[in-house]
Image: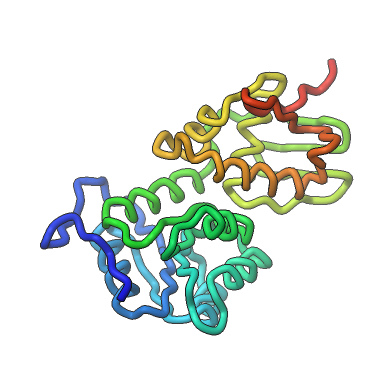
C-alpha cells in the first residue's frame, strides 16, 4: 500500500503563515486514503481543497471552477496523470504538481514534458508537500521584477507588464513558470546567468541543483518560441556556464 511519511504521530499545523486568502487546491488521486490525507494536510495549512478520485472527475472540477493549483497523481486507472495534465494544458495555465510513486528521472521528466510545473515523490512528509505547494503558488503570482520596457528581438515581442508574448505575429501561450523563466532572461538580456541562479530566482532557493527542471522548461519554452537548439535566435546556451537571452541591437 502506498503511504506518506508524517512528521510526527500527530499531524499538527505548521508554523507557516496561513494565506490571508484561502488558495484553492484541486487534489486528484484514485487512492482514497492518500487523497483524504493530502486533503487534511493542506486544509490544516489553510488551503481550500477540492478532492477528485479520477482524472475525469478532476477535469470536471477544474472546468467548473477556478483553482490556484492542481496536485495530480500519476498512476491512475483509465486516464493517468500525464494524460490529465496534457488535457489541462489545452485550456488552462493553472500550476500543476505531479505526485509520483517511483520518482525516477524519466518519470519526472515525462511529467514536466506533459506540462507540469513541479513534482513530489511518494512517500513524502507533510512538510515537503506543503513546501512544494507554497513554492509553486509563490511563483504563480505576478512576477516580482519591476516592469521592463517592451522587449523586442527580431520577430519576438515580450511585454512583461501585461504578460503578453508574441512571436512571428502570433500570440504564444506560456505557463506561469515558462513566462517567469522568459521574463527573468529578458531582464538579464546580454548577460549569462548560471542554472542555479535561474533556479533560485524563478523556482526558489530550495530548487538549487535540480537542473532537470530547468532543462525541461527551457526546452519547452524554446519549442513554443520556435527557437531551435541548432540555430537559436533568442536564447543561447553557454555550455558549463549557463543561458543568455540575446540583447536587442541599439
**In the figure, is residue 46 to the left or right of 196?**
left
Q: Residue at x 70, y 23 (%)?
A: 189
On the rendered structure, is 217 left or right of 205?
Answer: right
Residue 224 makes an appearance in the image = yes
Q: Quadrant of residue 40?
A: bottom left
The one nearer the camera, 108 or 37, is 108
Relative vertical location of residue 91 with respect to residue 51 in this rendering, above or below: above
**Residue pictured at 41% horizontal, 63% vertical:** 24
Q: Position of residue 16 (x, y in %)?
A: 25, 46
Q: Is residue 156 above or below residue 61?
A: above
Q: Quadrant of the N terminus?
A: bottom left
Q: How many marks?
A: 0
Question: Which residue is most to the left?
Answer: 9
Residue 15 appears at what percent x and percent y?
A: 19, 46
**The furthest residue to the top:** 250
Q: Quadrant of the C terminus?
A: top right
Residue 244 against residue 136 in the figure, above or below: above
Q: Considering depth in this image, is 33 or 176 the residue closer to the camera?
A: 33
> x, y percentage for residue 187?
64, 26
Q: Is residue 80 above or below residue 22?
A: below
Q: Residue at x 65, y 30 (%)?
A: 185
Which coloring applies here? rainbow
At which x and y percent is residue 9? 11, 62
Q: Quadrant of residue 32?
A: bottom left
**Residue depicted at 51% across the width and 66% down the height:** 66
Amino acid at each position: 500500500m502506498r503511504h506518506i511519511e508524517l512528521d510526527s504521530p500527530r499531524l499538527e499545523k505548521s508554523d507557516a503563515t496561513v494565506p490571508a486568502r484561502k488558495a484553492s487546491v484541486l487534489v486528484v488521486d484514485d487512492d482514497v486514503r492518500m487523497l483524504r490525507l493530502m486533503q487534511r494536510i493542506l486544509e490544516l495549512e489553510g488551503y481550500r481543497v477540492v478532492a477528485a478520485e479520477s482524472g475525469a472527475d478532476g477535469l470536471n472540477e477544474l472546468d467548473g471552477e477556478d483553482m490556484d493549483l492542481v496536485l495530480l497523481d500519476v498512476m491512475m486507472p483509465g486516464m493517468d496523470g500525464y494524460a490529465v495534465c496534457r488535457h489541462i494544458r489545452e485550456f488552462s495555465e493553472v500550476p500543476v504538481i505531479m505526485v509520483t510513486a517511483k520518482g525516477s528521472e524519466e518519470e519526472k521528466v515525462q511529467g514536466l514534458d506533459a506540462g507540469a510545473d513541479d513534482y513530489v515523490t511518494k512517500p513524502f512528509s507533510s512538510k515537503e508537500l506543503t513546501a512544494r505547494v507554497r513554492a509553486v503558488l509563490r511563483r504563480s503570482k505576478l512576477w516580482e521584477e519591476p516592469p521592463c520596457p517592451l522587449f523586442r528581438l527580431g520577430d519576438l515581442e515580450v511585454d512583461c507588464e501585461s504578460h503578453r508574448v508574441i512571436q512571428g505575429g502570433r500570440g504564444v501561450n506560456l505557463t506561469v513558470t515558462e513566462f517567469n523563466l522568459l521574463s527573468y532572461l529578458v531582464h538579464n538580456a546580454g548577460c549569462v546567468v548560471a542554472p542555479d541562479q535561474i533556479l533560485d530566482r524563478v523556482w526558489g532557493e530550495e530548487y538549487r541543483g535540480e537542473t532537470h527542471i530547468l532543462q525541461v522548461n527551457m526546452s519547452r519554452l524554446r519549442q513554443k518560441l520556435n527557437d531551435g537548439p541548432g540555430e537559436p535566435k533568442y536564447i543561447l546556451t553557454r555550455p558549463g556556464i549557463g543561458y543568455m537571452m540575446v540583447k536587442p541591437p541599439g
